[in-house]
Image: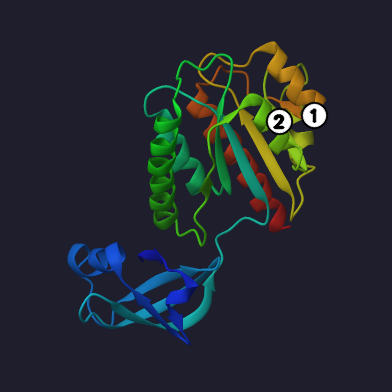
Amino acid sequence: MFNFFVDDSKRQGDIFYIDGTDFNHIKNVLRMRVGDELLVSSLGTSHLCEIESLDGDTAVVKITCENYQSTELPVEIILFQGLPKADKLELIIQKTVELGVTKIVPVEMSRCVVKLDEKKKNAKVIRWQAIAESAAKQSKRTVIPEIGNVLTFKQMLEEAKALDIFLVPYENKDGMAATKAALDKIKSGMKVGILIGPEGGFEEAEVEAAISLGGEAISLGSRILRTETAAITATAMCMLHIEMSEQK
Protein backbone atom coordinates (compact mmCIF):
# COMPACT_ATOMS: atom_id res chain seq x y z
CA MET A 1 0.00 0.00 0.00
CA PHE A 2 1.31 3.44 -0.91
CA ASN A 3 2.23 5.87 1.85
CA PHE A 4 2.10 9.69 1.68
CA PHE A 5 3.28 12.31 4.15
CA VAL A 6 0.73 15.11 4.53
CA ASP A 7 1.02 18.23 6.68
CA ASP A 8 -1.65 18.38 9.40
CA SER A 9 -2.76 21.75 8.03
CA LYS A 10 -4.19 19.77 5.10
CA ARG A 11 -6.57 17.92 7.42
CA GLN A 12 -10.15 18.83 8.25
CA GLY A 13 -11.85 16.38 10.57
CA ASP A 14 -11.43 12.94 9.03
CA ILE A 15 -10.51 14.34 5.61
CA PHE A 16 -7.04 14.99 4.14
CA TYR A 17 -6.50 17.15 1.07
CA ILE A 18 -3.47 16.08 -0.95
CA ASP A 19 -2.11 18.39 -3.65
CA GLY A 20 1.15 19.25 -5.41
CA THR A 21 3.56 16.53 -6.51
CA ASP A 22 1.86 13.90 -4.35
CA PHE A 23 -1.46 14.52 -6.12
CA ASN A 24 0.26 14.15 -9.47
CA HIS A 25 1.90 10.93 -8.28
CA ILE A 26 -1.42 9.51 -7.07
CA LYS A 27 -3.41 10.40 -10.19
CA ASN A 28 -0.98 10.31 -13.09
CA VAL A 29 1.84 7.98 -12.01
CA LEU A 30 0.10 5.43 -9.82
CA ARG A 31 -3.21 5.95 -11.67
CA MET A 32 -5.18 5.45 -8.48
CA ARG A 33 -8.95 5.78 -8.57
CA VAL A 34 -11.81 6.76 -6.29
CA GLY A 35 -12.24 4.01 -3.70
CA ASP A 36 -8.57 3.00 -3.66
CA GLU A 37 -6.86 2.79 -0.27
CA LEU A 38 -3.64 4.49 0.77
CA LEU A 39 -1.77 5.40 3.92
CA VAL A 40 -1.42 8.99 5.10
CA SER A 41 1.26 9.79 7.68
CA SER A 42 0.81 13.00 9.63
CA LEU A 43 2.29 14.15 12.96
CA GLY A 44 4.04 10.81 13.35
CA THR A 45 0.84 8.77 12.99
CA SER A 46 -0.27 6.58 10.10
CA HIS A 47 -3.92 6.53 8.98
CA LEU A 48 -5.63 4.16 6.55
CA CYS A 49 -7.57 6.27 4.05
CA GLU A 50 -9.81 5.88 1.01
CA ILE A 51 -9.83 8.22 -1.99
CA GLU A 52 -13.15 10.07 -2.22
CA SER A 53 -12.37 12.31 -5.20
CA LEU A 54 -9.57 13.30 -7.58
CA ASP A 55 -11.07 16.49 -8.97
CA GLY A 56 -9.03 19.48 -10.16
CA ASP A 57 -5.58 19.43 -8.58
CA THR A 58 -6.45 17.91 -5.20
CA ALA A 59 -7.10 14.41 -3.93
CA VAL A 60 -9.71 14.20 -1.18
CA VAL A 61 -9.11 11.18 1.04
CA LYS A 62 -11.12 10.05 4.05
CA ILE A 63 -9.73 8.30 7.11
CA THR A 64 -11.23 4.84 7.48
CA CYS A 65 -8.93 3.70 10.29
CA GLU A 66 -7.26 6.19 12.61
CA ASN A 67 -3.82 5.28 14.02
CA TYR A 68 -3.67 2.37 11.59
CA GLN A 69 -0.14 1.25 12.36
CA SER A 70 3.02 2.26 14.18
CA THR A 71 6.36 1.59 12.50
CA GLU A 72 8.63 3.86 14.55
CA LEU A 73 11.15 2.57 17.05
CA PRO A 74 10.68 3.64 20.70
CA VAL A 75 14.30 4.84 20.63
CA GLU A 76 15.84 7.74 18.70
CA ILE A 77 18.83 6.60 16.64
CA ILE A 78 21.13 9.35 15.36
CA LEU A 79 23.73 8.23 12.84
CA PHE A 80 26.86 10.39 12.68
CA GLN A 81 28.42 9.39 9.37
CA GLY A 82 31.91 10.35 8.25
CA LEU A 83 31.56 11.84 4.75
CA PRO A 84 32.21 9.06 2.23
CA LYS A 85 33.13 9.29 -1.44
CA ALA A 86 30.81 9.29 -4.48
CA ASP A 87 27.19 8.36 -3.83
CA LYS A 88 27.83 6.07 -0.84
CA LEU A 89 26.00 8.40 1.54
CA GLU A 90 22.88 8.10 -0.60
CA LEU A 91 22.92 4.32 -0.06
CA ILE A 92 23.57 4.78 3.65
CA ILE A 93 20.64 7.19 3.98
CA GLN A 94 18.28 4.94 2.06
CA LYS A 95 19.06 1.78 4.00
CA THR A 96 19.36 3.25 7.50
CA VAL A 97 16.07 5.14 7.05
CA GLU A 98 14.46 1.81 6.19
CA LEU A 99 15.99 0.38 9.37
CA GLY A 100 14.58 3.13 11.59
CA VAL A 101 17.09 5.94 12.15
CA THR A 102 15.69 9.23 13.39
CA LYS A 103 18.40 11.50 12.05
CA ILE A 104 21.53 11.26 9.91
CA VAL A 105 24.33 13.79 10.37
CA PRO A 106 27.22 13.91 7.86
CA VAL A 107 30.54 14.63 9.59
CA GLU A 108 33.82 15.95 8.23
CA MET A 109 36.63 13.85 9.74
CA SER A 110 40.39 13.85 9.38
CA ARG A 111 40.50 11.01 6.87
CA CYS A 112 37.55 12.12 4.74
CA VAL A 113 38.54 12.36 1.08
CA VAL A 114 35.48 14.45 0.18
CA LYS A 115 35.68 18.18 0.82
CA LEU A 116 32.52 20.23 0.28
CA ASP A 117 32.21 24.01 0.11
CA GLU A 118 29.17 25.68 1.70
CA LYS A 119 27.22 25.88 -1.57
CA LYS A 120 27.75 22.17 -2.27
CA LYS A 121 26.87 21.26 1.32
CA ASN A 122 23.48 22.97 1.07
CA ALA A 123 22.68 21.37 -2.29
CA LYS A 124 23.74 17.95 -1.03
CA VAL A 125 21.61 18.18 2.11
CA ILE A 126 18.54 19.02 -0.01
CA ARG A 127 19.16 15.98 -2.21
CA TRP A 128 19.89 13.74 0.78
CA GLN A 129 16.66 14.87 2.45
CA ALA A 130 14.69 13.91 -0.66
CA ILE A 131 16.27 10.45 -0.56
CA ALA A 132 15.31 10.11 3.11
CA GLU A 133 11.71 11.03 2.30
CA SER A 134 11.54 8.50 -0.53
CA ALA A 135 12.94 5.75 1.72
CA ALA A 136 10.52 6.69 4.50
CA LYS A 137 7.57 6.37 2.10
CA GLN A 138 8.80 3.02 0.79
CA SER A 139 9.32 1.54 4.26
CA LYS A 140 6.00 2.85 5.64
CA ARG A 141 7.64 5.13 8.18
CA THR A 142 5.32 7.60 9.90
CA VAL A 143 7.97 10.32 10.13
CA ILE A 144 10.60 11.51 7.68
CA PRO A 145 14.07 11.27 9.29
CA GLU A 146 16.03 14.51 9.27
CA ILE A 147 19.28 14.93 7.39
CA GLY A 148 21.34 17.33 9.48
CA ASN A 149 23.79 19.91 8.20
CA VAL A 150 27.35 18.75 7.56
CA LEU A 151 29.28 19.17 10.83
CA THR A 152 32.92 19.29 11.76
CA PHE A 153 34.08 16.59 14.16
CA LYS A 154 34.18 19.14 16.98
CA GLN A 155 30.60 20.23 16.27
CA MET A 156 29.52 16.61 16.22
CA LEU A 157 30.98 16.05 19.68
CA GLU A 158 28.89 18.95 20.97
CA GLU A 159 25.72 17.36 19.58
CA ALA A 160 26.72 14.01 21.04
CA LYS A 161 26.61 15.44 24.56
CA ALA A 162 22.81 15.18 24.46
CA LEU A 163 22.90 11.40 23.83
CA ASP A 164 22.04 8.73 26.37
CA ILE A 165 24.28 6.17 24.64
CA PHE A 166 27.05 6.86 22.14
CA LEU A 167 28.28 3.83 20.17
CA VAL A 168 31.64 3.89 18.39
CA PRO A 169 32.26 0.83 16.17
CA TYR A 170 36.01 0.36 16.38
CA GLU A 171 38.60 -2.29 17.16
CA ASN A 172 37.73 -3.63 20.60
CA LYS A 173 39.60 -6.28 22.56
CA ASP A 174 36.36 -7.46 24.15
CA GLY A 175 34.80 -8.15 20.74
CA MET A 176 31.11 -8.90 20.50
CA ALA A 177 30.79 -9.15 24.28
CA ALA A 178 31.31 -5.38 24.45
CA THR A 179 28.74 -4.88 21.70
CA LYS A 180 26.14 -6.96 23.52
CA ALA A 181 26.81 -5.16 26.82
CA ALA A 182 26.38 -1.76 25.13
CA LEU A 183 23.18 -2.77 23.31
CA ASP A 184 21.71 -4.17 26.53
CA LYS A 185 21.81 -0.63 27.97
CA ILE A 186 19.40 0.70 25.34
CA LYS A 187 15.96 1.36 26.80
CA SER A 188 12.74 2.80 25.41
CA GLY A 189 12.78 6.59 25.19
CA MET A 190 16.57 6.87 24.93
CA LYS A 191 18.56 8.82 22.37
CA VAL A 192 21.29 6.61 20.88
CA GLY A 193 24.12 7.85 18.66
CA ILE A 194 26.24 5.77 16.28
CA LEU A 195 29.54 7.18 15.00
CA ILE A 196 30.86 5.72 11.74
CA GLY A 197 34.22 6.66 10.25
CA PRO A 198 34.84 7.43 6.55
CA GLU A 199 36.68 5.12 4.11
CA GLY A 200 40.02 5.82 5.74
CA GLY A 201 38.70 5.06 9.19
CA PHE A 202 39.10 7.07 12.38
CA GLU A 203 42.15 8.94 13.51
CA GLU A 204 43.21 7.63 16.92
CA ALA A 205 42.60 11.09 18.40
CA GLU A 206 39.01 11.06 17.13
CA VAL A 207 38.26 7.76 18.84
CA GLU A 208 39.88 9.00 22.06
CA ALA A 209 37.80 12.19 21.94
CA ALA A 210 34.56 10.25 21.39
CA ILE A 211 35.32 7.81 24.20
CA SER A 212 36.33 10.59 26.60
CA LEU A 213 32.86 12.04 25.97
CA GLY A 214 31.26 8.77 27.08
CA GLY A 215 31.37 6.88 23.78
CA GLU A 216 31.48 3.09 24.01
CA ALA A 217 33.79 1.25 21.61
CA ILE A 218 31.99 -1.75 20.12
CA SER A 219 32.75 -4.42 17.53
CA LEU A 220 30.76 -5.21 14.39
CA GLY A 221 32.46 -8.58 13.98
CA SER A 222 35.83 -9.96 13.04
CA ARG A 223 35.78 -8.74 9.43
CA ILE A 224 36.79 -5.33 8.10
CA LEU A 225 33.67 -3.54 6.83
CA ARG A 226 33.38 -0.72 4.32
CA THR A 227 31.99 2.51 5.76
CA GLU A 228 28.57 1.98 4.14
CA THR A 229 28.43 -1.63 5.36
CA ALA A 230 29.40 -0.55 8.88
CA ALA A 231 26.66 2.09 9.01
CA ILE A 232 23.99 -0.33 7.87
CA THR A 233 25.24 -3.13 10.14
CA ALA A 234 25.42 -0.98 13.27
CA THR A 235 21.96 0.44 12.65
CA ALA A 236 20.52 -3.01 11.97
CA MET A 237 22.04 -4.38 15.18
CA CYS A 238 20.42 -1.60 17.19
CA MET A 239 17.09 -2.02 15.44
CA LEU A 240 17.04 -5.78 16.00
CA HIS A 241 17.96 -5.43 19.68
CA ILE A 242 15.29 -2.76 20.25
CA GLU A 243 12.55 -4.68 18.41
CA MET A 244 13.35 -7.94 20.25
CA SER A 245 13.44 -6.15 23.61
CA GLU A 246 10.01 -4.64 22.96
CA GLN A 247 8.52 -8.08 22.32
CA LYS A 248 9.65 -9.55 25.65
Q: In the figure, is residue 226 to the left or right of 36?
A: right
Which residue sits at x=74%, y=35%? 180
Q: In the figure, is residue 226 to the left or right of 219?
A: left
Is there CB contact under 8 Å for labels 2 and 1?
A: yes
Circle 2 sits in a helix, a strand or a loop, which is it?
helix
Percent from the top left, x then y, of residue 44? 55, 65
Which residue sits at x=74%, y=55%? 189
Instruction: Answer with the quarter of the image where residue 181 lies.
Output: top right
Percent from the top left, x then y, of residue 170? 67, 20
Q: Quadrant of the N terminus?
A: bottom left
The residue that label 2 is drawn on is 157
Percent from the top left, x then y, of residue 210? 74, 25
In this view of the protein, which residue sits in the foreground, 190 or 11? 11
The residue that label 1 is drawn on is 213
The colour mode here is rainbow
In this view of the protein, which residue sits in the foreground, 137 or 107? 107
Percent from the top left, x then y, of residue 36? 29, 77
